[in-house]
């Protein structure tokens, strides 16, 4: 029998999907197996700075924390204000900086170069210019030997791209130090 964790206390991807379907882009968090694949072989064990885009409820954040060496700085950029605040609570005491902002602002939010960028962003539901801005920002911050991992749900390609961000997304970027 396979048991999937659909939510962690105070956070639910399903609830956020119902509130902001075209920003959330999924009804459940990623599985531990996907989290393992997304974080292996990209040098997290040697990384000094790791950026996570769209952490959601922290499925990849947990996997990054497990692999990263002590002292590695992890910056998690989440556009959803409710998830960002809950994540900051969840990772209090851990070396995770949760930033409530859009990944489009990435280049202004982190000190570069960055050793690895791990993305949980819902690319298939994003407007093309947003995708392009984020990919340009990733290119701008990554170290020459840095790594970028991402995934996309092919089944979501039927959805129309989001037309406007929710009110929480238009807030100025804010940083909440969890650790
Ligand atoms: C499909 S969920 C993935 C969550 C988590 N990474 C996982 O795999 O379970 C996508 C996440 O990206 C966030 N997101 C969407 N657009 C974003 C943007 N432009 N900047 C930052 N986060 C964004 C959503 O709020 C949501 O938390």
Image: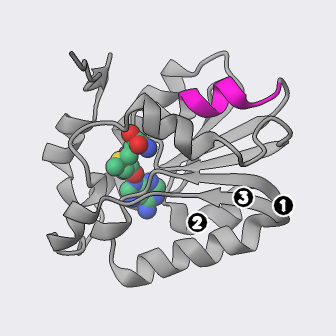
Q: Can the viewer see residue 83 in this picture? A: yes
Residue drawn at (27%, 64%), measured in percent from left and top? 154
Q: How crowded is mark 2: few (under 14 residues within 10 Å), some or many (20 or more)?
A: some
State the image coordinates of residue 155 (x, y, percent, origin top left): 20, 62
Colour setting: one colour
Residue drawn at (15%, 72%), measured in percent from left and top? 158
Cα gap from disc 3 to disc 2, whole angstroms: 19 Å
| Element assignment for label 2 | helix
Of the numbered discs 3 and 2, the one sitting upstream in the chain is 2
Cα gap from disc 2 to disc 1, whole angstroms: 15 Å
The residue pinned by badge 2 equals 105
Q: Which of marks 1 and 3 is in front?
A: 3
Question: Is residue 36 highlighted in magenta?
Answer: no
Vertical relation: 17 (above or below) 132: above
The residue pinned by badge 1 equals 113
| Element assignment for label 1 | loop
State the image coordinates of residue 116 (x, y, percent, origin top left): 72, 52
Q: Which of marks 3 and 2 is in front?
A: 3
Q: Can the viewer see residue 58 in this picture? A: no
Q: Is residue 1 left or right of residue 33?
A: left
Residues drawn in magenta:
62-69
| Element assignment for label 3 | strand
The residue pinned by badge 3 equals 147
């Amino acid at each position: 029998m396979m048991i999937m964790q659909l939510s962690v206390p105070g956070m639910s991807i399903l609830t956020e999907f119902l509130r902001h379907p075209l920003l959330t882009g999924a009804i459940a968090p990623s599985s531990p197996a996907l989290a393992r694949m997304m974080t292996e072989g990209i040098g997290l064990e040697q990384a000094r700075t790791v950026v996570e885009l769209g952490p959601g409820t922290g499925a990849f954040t947990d996997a990054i924390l497990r692999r990263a060496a002590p002292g590695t700085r992890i910056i998690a950029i989440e556009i959803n204000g409710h998830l960002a605040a809950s994540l900051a609570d969840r990772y209090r005491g851990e070396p995770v900086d949760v930033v409530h902002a859009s990944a489009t602002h990435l280049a202004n939010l982190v000190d570069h170069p960055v050793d690895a960028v791990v993305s949980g962003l819902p690319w298939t539901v994003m407007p093309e210019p947003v995708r392009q801005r984020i990919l340009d920002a990733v290119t701008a911050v990554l170290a020459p030997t840095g790594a970028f991992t991402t995934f996309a749900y092919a089944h979501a390609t039927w959805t129309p791209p989001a037309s406007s961000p929710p009110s929480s997304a238009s807030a100025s970027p804010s940083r909440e130090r969890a650790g």
